[in-house]
Image (tube, rainbow, N blue to C red):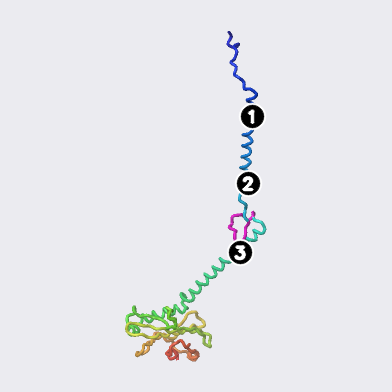
Amino acid sequence: MNPYLRPRPSFPRPSSALVLRRLPRTAELARCYATKSDLGRGSGSSSAPRRRSVTVLSDDGRYQWGELSGKEKVARATQQSFNFLVVLAGAVLTGGVFYLLYTEVFSPNSRTWQYEKAVDRIKNDTRCTDLLGDRREIKAYGENTWNRWARNRPIASSIEKDRLGREHLKMNFHVEGPRNSGIVFVHMMKPLDQHEWQYQLLALDVKGHPRIVLEQAPEKPGVGKALKLFVWNSQFHPEMTQAFA
């Protein structure tokens, strides 16, 4: 028998009833998948974070300038202007502090600088150390105060102008050593054509001993009368009037 003419084995075909039973199941799965997909997209769109409005207090620079509305641009400009003013005020205060430190402490024309300079002159003068004692043990301090909580004693000093317009710096402070204690008198003048102080008098008075004069400018015509116009403040010692009389 010809093999090509052999009848092929026949497989049982599914009945129409079975096909009808499977179709609803497939349609049900498709609808379920579609429903879940729609739910997922809906929940994602509803939970997306909304962009919060930008205000002066809440602006953190997260959004670009082009993304801001008119009111938000005004808020950002206000915040940046305020920040600039704060930085500017801080820079001005810092500069002022440095200026005060220089003029009051580090400048050669400051009282503190002249005070330290006078103390060094006393410690380096052999006549002063013979009366006071070892230079390493000499202490310098200002006037006593009524405030018992004050740790630093202020230095009695004043800056005034004479009738010729020249500035005069007058200062006195105490020195104490192992042997004796005394008072240092300082008088300096700044000529009109110069910016540095010049000594008119630098002297040390120790009770029971002659005055030690370290610096004394020669009296010039007209200068002596100008110096006598000054009256020392009540906080100075009575000896100050004798020192500059």
Assign the magenta stretch its main secondary structure. loop
Of badges 2 and 3, nearer the viewer stands: 2
Q: Residues within 10 Å of mark 1 (few under 14, many from 20)?
A: few
Q: Residues within 10 Å of mark 2 (few under 14, many from 20)?
A: few
Callouts 2 and 3 close, C-beta under 8 Å: no
Q: Is residue 225 above or below residue 175?
A: below
Name the side, left or right, on which 186 lies relative to 24: left
Amino acid type, mark 1 = Leu
- The vertical placement of 62 against 218, above or below, is above
Q: Residue at x 64, y 32 (%)?
A: 27
Q: Earlier in the sequence, mark 1 or mark 2?
A: 1
Distance between mark 1 and mark 2 Cα atoms: 33 Å
Q: Which residues are magenta?
A: 53-67
Is label 2 in a helix, a strand or a loop? helix
Is disc 3 surrounded by few (<14), some (14 to 19) or many (20+) residues within 10 Å? few
Q: Nearer the viewer, residue 145 or 185?
A: 145
Q: In which quadrant of the rendered view does residue 213 lie?
A: bottom left
| Residue beneath disc 1 | 23
- Residue at numbered disc 3: 81
Image coordinates for residue 211, horizontal then vertical, percent: 37, 89
Q: Considering the numbered disc 1 on the image, is that residue within a helix, a strand or a loop?
A: helix
- Indicate the quadrant containing the C terminus: top left, top right, bottom left or bottom right: bottom left
Amino acid tagged 3: Ser
Q: Could you say which is closer to the camera, residue 37 or residue 133?
A: 37
- Which residue is farthest top? 1
Instruction: Please identify, in this view, whether the residue under mark 1 or under mark 2 is nearer the observer.
Output: 1
**What amino acid type is highlighted by mark number 2?**
Ser
Residue 118 drawn above or below residue 60: below
Q: Which residue is mark 2?
A: 45
- CA gap between label 3 and label 1 equals 71 Å
User: Residue 239 in the image: x percent, y percent?
Assistant: 42, 90
Q: CA distance from mark 2 to mark 3?
A: 38 Å
